[in-house]
Amino acid sequence: MEAGAITGILDTTLALVFTWVVYKTGAYIYKYTPYSYPNARINAMEAKLLTGQRFNELAESRTLNNFVVSLEDTDYREYLSDVSEYSLEEVEKGLERALAGTYTLMFDVLPKRVGPFFRLLLEAWDIRNIASVVKAKNLGESASDYIIELGTMVPKVKAMAEAKSMEEILVILEGTPYEEPYQKLLLGELSLQGFETELYRMHYSKLLDYALSRKGEERTILGEFVRINVDKLNILTVLRAKSAHMSAEEIRPLLIKGGTLKLDPMLHVEDLGMALAELDGTRYGPVIRDVREEVEKDLSVLEKALEDHIVARMGELTRFYPLSVATPLNYIVRKDREVRKLRAIAKLINDGVPPERIKEIVGGVA
């Protein structure tokens, strides 16, 4: 073979190798570099999550005033600065604002290809507000008292609360995704419970659609996050329904699509114990096994166990994909659990529960 031909082959080979290296390097940079700064920031925020010792100290507060003062050296300070009357409602709303602030921060700092997912998570407050206002209106109560000023449509929710009639609310919801289910509610095609279920069904459908529109590990991680949360809601719904002796036909309309579980076997058993037995052969069998006896007496034990499982699963994904969307998801599930513990402590203090008893109870809060 002539030297020129050999040189040509070598040049072509080198060009292909160079192109491959450039492509792989570019793909690596696109995939991982955008997570370097936000995940480093989130890791620093994780170090500030409250410890068990700190929760015990907060349980000793005895008054909501002391409770709020004790949080002044934390990131909750800016969200509780408006608390003036030290009422439970004010404190709870401040803690909710802190959690919503976490989702907003993730939307702001994460890569644009995943940031909108965290804005979708904020819509959970829209659903809570809409459902609360509609329920209050049906009961003839002051709907404004049930609004948490968080989410993506606070002005509309406030307008709903001030509406003179149920039909006026339909006009306010016109053009939103919630117009159609509310119209069905007015026409009697949905019950109040069915209306709320439909709102959450739409919410999780949007989250899953977004997750499945991503690629690679982002699709895997976001999809897993949505599905295990749907599983948790469906498991608790079925078990509560079985405790109330509801039939499969009554339970099915209350379930949300998108989870990993086949729920039909649970729907057709006679009681709670048999429904739990059906879960033994699923991925949630090990989660339930250790708390089985307690769960049959108190379903809140299972709720905590499932929440712990979600935290553990996000932790696993974070270790497996350290430069990915798993890190912010792991943080928000832990932050959510922290806020719920703080709300539980605040409520127990407000109810006059002794500190030692608060420590016992909060130790069992997910």
Image: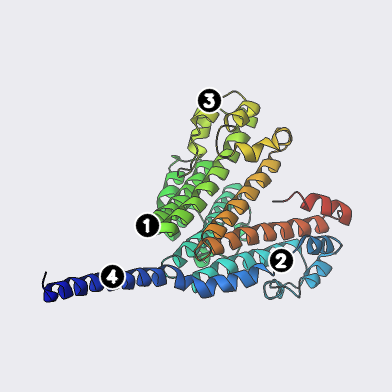
User: Which of the two marks, 3 or 4, is nearer to us in this view?
Assistant: 4
Task: Write down the residue under mark 1.
Answer: 213
Q: Is residue 250 left or right of residue 295?
A: left
Give the Cα distance between marks 1 and 3.
Answer: 34 Å
The residue under label 2 is 90
Where residue 163 appears, as percent x and y from the top left, is: 52, 59
* Disc nearer the start of the sequence (2/4): 4
Q: Identity of the amino acid at label 2?
A: Glu
The residues tagged by marks 2 and 4 sit, at their Cα atoms, a distance apart of: 63 Å
Residue density around tag 1, few if under 14, some if 14–19, many if 20 or more, within 10 Å: few
2 or 3: mark nearer the eye: 3
Q: Residues within 10 Å of mark 4 (few under 14, many from 20)?
A: few
Q: Secondary structure at mark 2?
A: helix
| Alpha carbons under labels 2 and 1: distance apart | 39 Å
Closer to the observer: label 1 or label 3?
A: 1
State left or right for residue 12 relative to residue 168.
left
Front residue of 290/295: it is 290
Q: Which of 101 and 295 lies nearest the eye of the viewer?
A: 295
Q: Are marks 1 and 3 in contact (CB under 8 Å)?
A: no
x, y percentage for residue 10? 21, 72
Name the residue type under label 1. Ser
The image position of residue 3, as x and y in percent, is 13, 75
Judging by the rendered image, the residue that carries numbered circle 4 is 17
Label 3 amino acid?
His
95 to 262, vertically: above or below = below
The residue drawn where x is 71% and y is 42% is 301
Q: Residue at x 69, y 73 (%)?
A: 75
Q: Is residue 285 left or right of residue 174?
A: right
